[in-house]
Image (cartoon, rainbow, N blue to C red):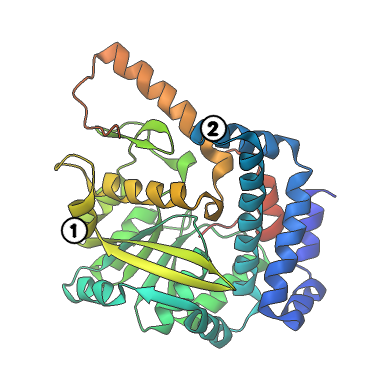
Amino acid sequence: MTSARFRHLIQTEHALSLLRAIGPDATLEGIALIFGAFAARNAAYQEQLRTALARVFPERPAPQRRSLARAIQRGAGLHFGEKLLNLTLAVPESKELAMARVDVSGLDLLRAELARGGGVLLATGHFGGYELLPALLTAHGIPASALVKLPADRVGEESRRKAAEGGLELIEMGQGRAASTQIVDSLRQGRAVIFTIDEIRRWRRESHEHLSFLGERVPVDQASSRLASLAGCGAVYGAMHRTGRRRYRLVLEPVAALRGRSRLPAAASISSLLLERLGADILREPEQWYHWDDHHVLARLAGVAAERGALRGDSNRLATEPRQGALVDLREALVGGGEA
């Protein structure tokens, strides 16, 4: 079955009606199973996953890495299921589900940051149940915005309609003004802007900082630092951990708290602090991150950075020493290529 054909089937009214009828839990399990079967037959994806896990966890025996690979595939399938829940559930149901199943740590810290004015850059990754984050924030009365890339089809239309109904502002890449300008405007309006920091294929290659991220010493994309500086706002790291039995735990941490615990130099940028924190979460719970097919991009960035450093003699750069991945077709088949 081609990706285009599968995408068409999963987005038909009959398919969406079935998902609505069977409920959230069956939807999550069903999509996870379908994704697992689809991923298992994608040889390129399997090879990328094996290579990435061997580089990041060389100390683990091969059977353990194979088991981890299966857990990662299941986590990715659950992610797509959660994405489809946003499409199939009515807005009040989405908020009710998020409120019922997500335990939150640090919401008071987020409110305190917003109370200072200037908004908050809420940095997260494609980790755990982050698709529930917009519904949860708006359910708690937090003025929220999200940077997205929506497909030009009924999925995009439905996403826009539900966002408007739910009080979520969408900042669409490639639509009108530059996304960075829209983000800064939203931050200056006192909103919490959800911003994913692990879009590795979009990272800018030039940076004065490098750090070790998932075993690769890479240049740090400075987008988070630049946006926070332009808007004059604070930044908060957020991770939506899956805790089992269809429950989640959102942990929110202001950058000031990250800096106090960081192993990076005192002058480390906001971007470095956020990326260090995300990397630590991924290493602790690798099955909760679904961008493992992009790890080869990290390895390539690390190689280019090493070559440039050798040519320039850049021995004094700030550092710490303690896409076109194969999954793209699977993502497009399930959700039409849109990313939040």
> Residue 296, which numbered label?
2
- Residue 295 lies left or right of residue 1; in this view the side is left
Q: Is residue 195 above or below residue 322?
A: below
Looking at the picture, does residue 167 appear above or below residue 236? below
The three-letter amino acid code for the residue at tag 1 is Ala
Give the image location of residue 236, x and y in percent.
Answer: 29, 62
Q: Quadrant of residue 235?
A: bottom left
* Left or right of 123 in this view: 45: right
Q: How far apart in space, not on screen, are marks 1 and 2 (Cα)?
A: 32 Å
Tell me where residue 90 appears, x and y as whole percent. Answer: 61, 84
Q: Residue at x 32, y 38 (%)?
A: 220
Q: As displayed, is residue 146 above or below residue 223? A: below
Mark 1 = which residue? Answer: 256
Quarter of the rendering containing residue 327: top right
Q: Badge 2, how many Cα within 10 Å: few under 14, some, many 20+? A: some
Q: Which residue shows up at 71% across the image and 72% down it?
A: 27
Q: Residue furthest right?
A: 1
Percent coordinates x, y for residue 340 in the rendering: 50, 60
The answer to which of 145 and 25 lies nearer the viewer is 25
Residue 36 spot, x, y in % from top left? 73, 53
Q: Residues within 10 Å of mark 1 (few under 14, many from 20)?
A: some
Disc 1 secondary structure class: helix
Q: Residue at x 70, y 61 (%)?
A: 32
Residue 108, disc: none
